Amino acid sequence: MTMFDIISLVIGVLLIVIAFLAINSKKLIKAVLFLSALSMLSVVAFVLMKAPDVAITEAVIGSGLVTSLFVFTLLSVRRGESK
Amino acid sequence: MIQYVAIILFVLGLYGLLVNRNVIKMVISLNIMEIGLNLFIISIGFVYDGIAPIITSSAGTGALIYVDPLPQALVLTAIVIGVGTTALALAIAKSIHVKHNTFDLNEVEETV
Amino acid sequence: MKNLLALFGSLLLALGIILALSNNTLFPSFGEADLSDRVSDEYLTQDEIDALGSANIVTSIVVGYRGFDTLGEVTVLFISSLGVALLLGSSAKQKRLELNFKPNFMLRVGSRALFGFILLTGIYIILHGHLTPGGGFPGGTMIASSILLLYLADDQFRAKIKSFKILEGVSGSLYVIVGLLGLLLATYFMQNFLPVGTVGDLLSAGVIPIIYILIGLKVGSEISGIIDNFLTEEEAK
Amino acid sequence: MNAVLLIAVPLIAAFLSIISKKIAPYLMLVVGLFNLILVFFIPEGFVIIGGFSQSLGINLLFDSFAKIALILVNSLVLIIFFLNIKKYGSYSSILLVALAGLNGLLLTNDLFNLFVFLEIAGIAAYLISTSNKKPTHTFHYLVLGVVGSSLYLFGLIILYAMFGTLNMVDLIGKIQLSGNYKNLILPFLLMFIGLGVEAKLLPFNSWVKGILGKSNTLSGPIFASVYAATIGFVLGRLINNLFMFEGSLLTVVIVILSVGILIGEAMAFASSKAREILLFSSVAQASIVALLFTNGIIIWAVYLIIANALSKLVLFLVINKATEDTGTDELDALQGLFSKNILVGITFTLASLSVMGLPLLAGFAIKLNFLTELASSNQIMLIAIILISTLVEGIYFVRMLVKLWYKGENEVSVKYNLSFKIVFVIIALALLVFGTYSTPLNKLDNSIDTIQEVVNNG
């Protein structure tokens, strides 16, 4: 087994586990954070597959922006519920 | 390896859409599906021992093996399109919440 | 029970796809793609690189060969920001969403200090899109996230949405107009009509940097608009 | 004149229209008119973008198939917008983008570019459906739409991995060289299912009931006639030029489509709401169109799309306007709708009879011709299915017409504007003209036949 195989195995297992957690976790904010982690791990996978452009874009847009949009949606709603 | 993981992620996203009735969780599932698809597209173009498709002045273009740049360009487009749909889906989720005061589609159907 | 069945079915589907792909004689197995069969092979020849003048081949595909896709991509972002504005209310009678925390001193000063750095990084990424990884989309998003920091630092802050709209509209139409200039000055829509220069220089690659700057401006203003829409709500009546 | 302008001009207008909301509706009108005139002045052939050789860059294909589709779509969008300009003027930026997206779908010769335009048209569609004010249905539509386009993308990426090109003409050449159809089943099935979501093919169309069943005078006609026509043309191009279903895949597709026809008609038969009857009937019609394309009956499928788009425009406009005024679309509540609106009633009757396929109307000429073509290739099962569907259609349309013509207990007062009436009359006349004097249809035959030739020679 080469270094590449070992890293990709670890990342692959982590990706599937985190995806499963994101789908099945009861709390919405947890699911959002798992999605963010999933996106960050996919960035590693992109770098591993020699796609730096995609990695930067996914890190900034997929992981950063999308997560913040999710969080804003949840924040705006939670305030409404407490009222 | 990563190719199989990508397919499983795609299918897990579909599974999430099937079992979840909460709109936020459904949008999350859509995103998981898109990440899986993006990984799959990149894995199509990967070549062992290939290098990223950027010409640097230190190396000539002759004997180097590059990974396929076209799938990378496609994924860039797909990621941005995914963000567009996610933002829209969240805005719709928010307006569902304004109207029905819940994110759960089961509860929405009860109130209607 | 129902969930387990769905999971089982989904995994069966994945197995089916994997088996179908591995039995497919024309489908290359992972890591063994043969570029000489693909159109990408030609993107990597010296002639094509010289013709476009961009050191980053992905950029030359995104903005050059498949520039029409990118125009569509910008349009997708445009229409979704339009839709978010439509759904979450127009900017006339909006006020800031009250977050659950008051920004403390560290956050206020820190994010203002970071604002400049992130803005500059975004601009740098856009300008070097044809040389290094990155480009208009991540760069534009970085510019937007620097504005997001301002939102977090000050709970009364609101960006001037009207001017963003104008910037968005103007940069978008300029993008199409650059394409139409190609039709007028050269022969085809979106054809390069500027000298390409030497591969690797900052001032090279013809219209690619210009298009990336326009994309960066447009994406930045669109995403700022989306963020503003998510962080505001209708004034309580 | 360059076919790119059909996409570029609406886009510039859309980008500029957000600066001032007041001028946006007028921009839409001007651009719509400009596009409609422009279509007639574009020479046929490939349109290269960016000046790269054919397989490297993206190019568009403007042939007679695309030309007919573009004329239909651009004129319908213009008409529908014109009728709704007062009430839904704020949707003009979205309609401009939708117009660009639909034109792109019809023109593009690149599979990934098709995906991009599918997303543009799709997102525009989700936004147009928000005018129904039913966010849960819009959300449902969005989720299905995104899944559909992702499946399409999945399929096309597998094709790229196998053949190394995204250009449709190139790809068809390479597929013909490879010879083995078995490898193609998975990607083609994924792409077909993906497009099936937008094309309202069963069982991927659960969004239709929520969207069209709650539609208004803007979203109803846009989805039932403009989007249905566009996606029908796109599906036709892909089925005939790329998929060319064979063997077991052909059987699967034909079974799916036949079941789609029967279930659609059955659901329409069982419903008592006017809008639901119309939408289930259009689900069945979409399957018939796809079925004709899979059997290679291109010309009559094209006419069927055109005739359906025209008649569905009238049907949905009449019913949705009535629903807007009365607040319900239960047939019982709308009884006697036409007793005061005789002119509207006549046009509605003509349109619905044309969908059924009664003599003297366009639908009849089309049905007769494709049934004879099916008979000549011995497709007894399909003929039986289409005849059954015609019978069921006849029953529920006549039932609906009888209800709408005969006066009930309560007065139904719906007022149709002059502009609505003019459009109805023009379309009804067109259906009559094409039904009785079908030479113009036959004349077009020769030109449509050339799609395959363009691909083979290109």
Image (cartoon, coloured by chain):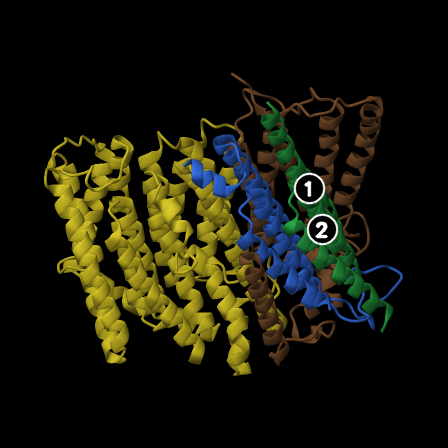
Chain colours: A green, B blue, C brown, D yellow
Q: Nearer the viewer, residue A52 or D105?
A: A52
Q: Quadrant of residue C95?
A: top right
List the residue tagged with mark 2. A39
Q: Is residue D456 above or below residue A82?
A: below
SS at circle 2: helix
Q: Earlier in the sequence, mark 1 or mark 2?
A: 2
Q: Amino acid type of disc 1?
A: Thr
* Label 1, label 2: how far apart the Cα atoms are: 9 Å
- Left or right of D119: which side holds D245? left
Res. A67 mark: 1
Residue at x-position 25% and y-position 74%: D373
Where does the image place residue D114, in percent across and percent down from the top left? 51, 58
SS at circle 1: helix
Q: Which of D236 and C108 is in front in this view?
A: C108
Q: Amino acid type of disc 2?
A: Ser
Q: In this view, does D238 lie above or below D305?
A: below
Q: Which of D27 and C183 is in front in this view?
A: D27
Q: Are marks 1 and 2 in contact (CB under 8 Å)?
A: yes
Q: Mark 1 lies on which chain?
A: A
Q: Is residue D184 above or below residue C178?
A: below
**Would residue C74 be visible to someone looking at this image?**
no
Q: Mark 2 lies on which chain?
A: A
Residue at x-position 20% and y-position 51%: D352
